[in-house]
Amino acid sequence: MTVAVSLPRLPCAAMIRKGIVWLMDIILHVGAHRTGSTSFQHYIRGNRSRLMAEGTALWEPHMLRKGVFDGLFAAPRMLNGRNLQRRAMGRVRLHAAQAQRAGAERLLVSEENMIGAPRACLRAASLYPAIGERMARLDAAFEGGITRVVMCIRAQDLWWSSIAAFGLARGHQLPDAVRLEALATSPRTWRDVITDLSCALPQAEIKILPFEQFAGQADKVLAQATGHPAPLAHAESWLNRSPDLEMLRRRMAENGMPTAELPAHLAEGEGRWNPFTPGQSAALREAYTDDMMWLTAGADGLATLTEDPSRTRAGQSLSAGALTKGQSHDQHTHTHTRFQGRLAQTG
């Protein structure tokens, strides 16, 4: 009689069964939203052939949304007896393995929705509250193979204003005074976001790029992501700008709201929309200053602040060409050609 013997599952055996050994770098460009991610994706798409020839495989939103990532971040559910989240993880590994077999030395994944949706941030009055769980799922999909994460951040007063303006132009609800106060007093800052990101991806190098220094310089963002020289073609295109006050008023009128019913911060003025009171803006700028001080001091070893050595932090301007190719990004002053880099004056 044959007796079946069950051998213990040793850790080393589990590692062998785990499957793919990644021989290429897996690099994530996670946004954040409203920091030039669309412009960056336009740039790498325009240079796809050259980048692929140099060993960089690209994943962009058009192949990830309703595609490779579909079901990965949703609540686990079954369909016809199949676990959709597990199937999404399988798709990630399959496509990554195909890139590796094709000879890619690195895989660059650029998708700002990996860390959450802007509307979810507005509803929670919090910066990317689910980033930890979402990135842990992605790390599991790549079997712990993520080597580097690049994230751009910007001053909270401008970030929240841009998020709200973009949503408002798409027909979303105008944030009321209670919501604006909740955003201005939220205790969660970029420091908390970065800490959650590091906890979810403890093996990955995390590079933080200030939007104030890297805006309109997609080539420099790519160079920081890959560690290799980046092409200059398409680097200065600025896309997906936030609507200014005039555009927002026109959109609100189209939606049936007369100008007389608009709040003062929207009914008057020109240029970039700022719905916050001076006190709220100051509080948000102070929070960003604290974030930058933490990053400058080493971020507790969790991340690296990567600054552009060709710029200083105060009083910098973007080149005129950067703001005239494609659509302009958010206006940081009353003109289209100036960019206020001083942290204390970003409002």
Image: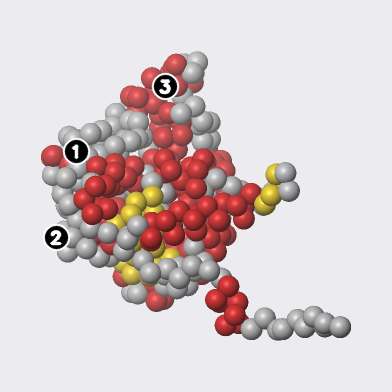
Q: In the rendering, at what x and y percent does residue 129 appear?
A: 55, 55
Which amino acid type is shown beneath numbered disc 1?
A: Leu
Residue closest to the eye, 148 or 306:
148
Residue at 29%, 29% (x, y): give it: 270
Number of disc labels: 3
Structural distance between the alpha carbons of marks 3 and 2: 39 Å
Task: Say which amino acid is labelled 3.
Answer: Arg
Residue that numbered label 3 is attached to: 251
Q: Secondary structure at mark 2?
A: loop
Q: Position of residue 40 (x, y in %)?
A: 29, 47
Is residue 296 visible in this depiction of the protein? yes
- Disc 3 crowd, CA 10 A, few/some/many (<14, 14-19, 20+): some
Q: Residue furthest right?
A: 1
For marks 3 and 2, the one nearer the N-term is 3
Residue 248, by quadrant, is: top left
Lateral position of residue 194 relative to residue 87, left or right: left
Q: CA distance from mark 3 to mark 1?
A: 24 Å
Specify which label sits upstream in the sequence, 3 or 1: 3
**Residue carrying label 2:** 310
Please name the residue shown 53% across and 35% down the image.
176
Residue at image mark 1: 323
Position of residue 282 relative to residue 16, above or below, is: above
Closer to us: mark 3 or mark 1?
1
As helix, strand or loop, the secondary structure at mark 3 comes to helix
User: Disc 3 vs disc 2: which is toward the camera?
Assistant: 2
